[in-house]
Amino acid sequence: MNKLNDNQLLKQYSYINGSWHSSETEFAVVNPATGELLINVSNAGVIETELAVKSAKSALKAWSSKSAAERAVLLRNWFNLMMEHQDDLARILTLEQGKPLAEAKGEIAYGASFIEWFAEEGKRVYGDTIPAPSGDKRIVIIKQPVGVVASITPWNFPNAMIARKAAAALAAGCTFVGRPATQTPLSALAMAELAERAGIPGGVFNIVVGEDAKGMGKVLTEHPDVAKFTFTGSTAVGKQLIAQCATSVKKVSMELGGNAPFIVFDDADIDAAVQGALVSKYRNAGQTCVCTNRIFVQKDIAQAFTDKFVAAVAQFKIGNGVEEGVVIGPMIAKNAVDDVDKLVLDSVKAGAKVLLGGVRSPAGDNFYQPTVLTQVTNDMPVAANEIFGPITPIITFETEQEVIDMANATEYGLASYFYARDIGRIWRVAEGLEYGMVGINEGLISNAAAPFGGVKQSGSGREGSKYGLDDYLEIKYLCMGGLS
Ligand code: ADP
């Protein structure tokens, strides 16, 4: 941590109503690459979360009354500050989360890009007029901020998951309370420090950090002053939180798990497909919800694709994310390594063959060797479950319909990818995949201009793009009568 240019970005307290709140107890933030203590952070709980909601409610009137252009100036300041401090923010992120520094820098730019995007998009919250059924009436539609937004976010993108939600919420005129994952509070608190420097008024953006996920989650999902709840995390926890939100009928958006298919057809550019598969699979050591989970390769090109893919993965440097040239950092914790190890062992028992890796890494307790498995079938544990680790199962197929059916045979529907050249096939497959996002000859699809989100049990709502504001706006219908 001593290598930061600006030490004020390292915070230990929750940020509530524009000030830093200490609590009675602390919890440790640990570097997943080394197991070393980074810093102790003040352990906020239910009381602080309630205070943050109250502050967000108090700040709502003034914030929502500002013009979109006024809010845009402050959001733009925030974006500029994030980019100015990109190196420090990336360093904090790598230290608490593990991903290689280059990826962490990418995440900061990606997170900031949502703030930039929504600063502008907030100016385009247009209403509507509708021809009335009788001459003495006029129908006008206006859009208004939903109110206080509460969010719970995971550890895999400690900056961007918050930025994607808060940027849209604040641009729409909502105020925000975020609870980041316990493993990665520091990136969120650094964002709060920069929000303050940007001039975003106290109470508009609050961050509560603490270990009591359930208790804090209960406040954020059930408090009557919270109008909308947004969550990124596992499907299992998402389902519980949706149920909690039902008690007060909150608006909800959910960005949950995935089981992304990556399909390579026999007319694909194989080298491009290998590159696409590498970035979509091994980013963040495979710990993203849009990571390729299953590669399907058409029979005739399976050998050629697999040989090239394995050769490329074998080159990956594994290690501490702050070291030069590292591509695969640690997993977030030892139990995550245990989980992927079990998936691999169970799949091998069921007949899968290890082409590369398949074991824990000597780099440290939280590391797992990048792994490639063949002779996999779609029902093996490694294909049927979300992997969240650096493991690639390869499944071969013969026909287009067969692979579409296999790709869709999951409760998830977040990201999907395929490589092909035939234009008819491209449309058939793109329309046949039951996923919220489809990368066609592309393995990296996420950006602020595009709607990120899933179908089926991968969630609801969209983040980014012109659609992303809708989740933070209510439609109000004004009927003016007596005009004749
Ligand atoms: P992940 O596998 O990414 O940790 P989780 O869904 O377990 O996915 O966690 C995502 C976020 O939800 C984290 O911030 C975690 O602390 C929080 N969380 C987990 N369980 C609960 C719960 N029962 N109530 C509220 N928040 C929770």
Image (cartoon, grey):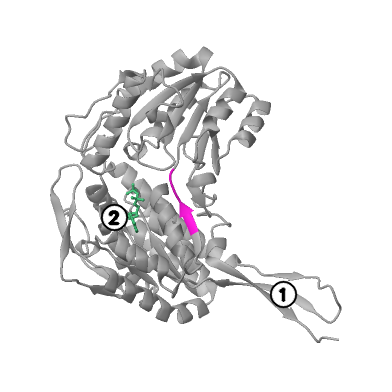
* Residue occupying image coordinates x 41% and y 51%: 110
Q: Nearer the viewer, mark 2 or mark 1?
A: 1
Q: For residue 53: magenta?
A: no
Q: Nearer the viewer, residue 385 or 418?
A: 385
Q: Position of residue 148 (x, y in %)?
A: 45, 72
- Which residue is situated farthest in the left direction here? 36
For residue 406, the mark is: none
289 lies left or right of 299 = left
Please state which amino acid type lies under the numbered disc 1: Val
Which residue corresponds to mark 1? 140
Height in image: 308 above or below 199? above
10 Å crowding of disc 1: few (<14), some (14-19), many (20+)? some
Q: Position of residue 48 (x, y in %)?
A: 28, 72
* Residue occupying image coordinates x 43% and y 32%: 384
Give the Cα separation between the discs numbered 2 and 1.
Answer: 45 Å
Which residue corresponds to mark 2? 89
Residue 51 visible in the shown view: yes
Q: Secondary structure at mark 2?
A: helix
410 lies left or right of 189 = right
Q: Secondary structure at mark 1?
A: strand
Image quarter hosting the C terminus: bottom right
Span shown in magenta:
253-257
Q: Main secondary structure of the magenta part?
A: strand
Residue 201 visible in the shown view: no
Image quarter hosting the N terminus: bottom left
Residue 122 in which image quadrant: bottom right
Please state which amino acid type lies under the numbered disc 2: Leu
Which numbered disc flags the more N-terminal residue, 2 or 1?
2
Q: Nearer the viewer, residue 264 or 103?
A: 264
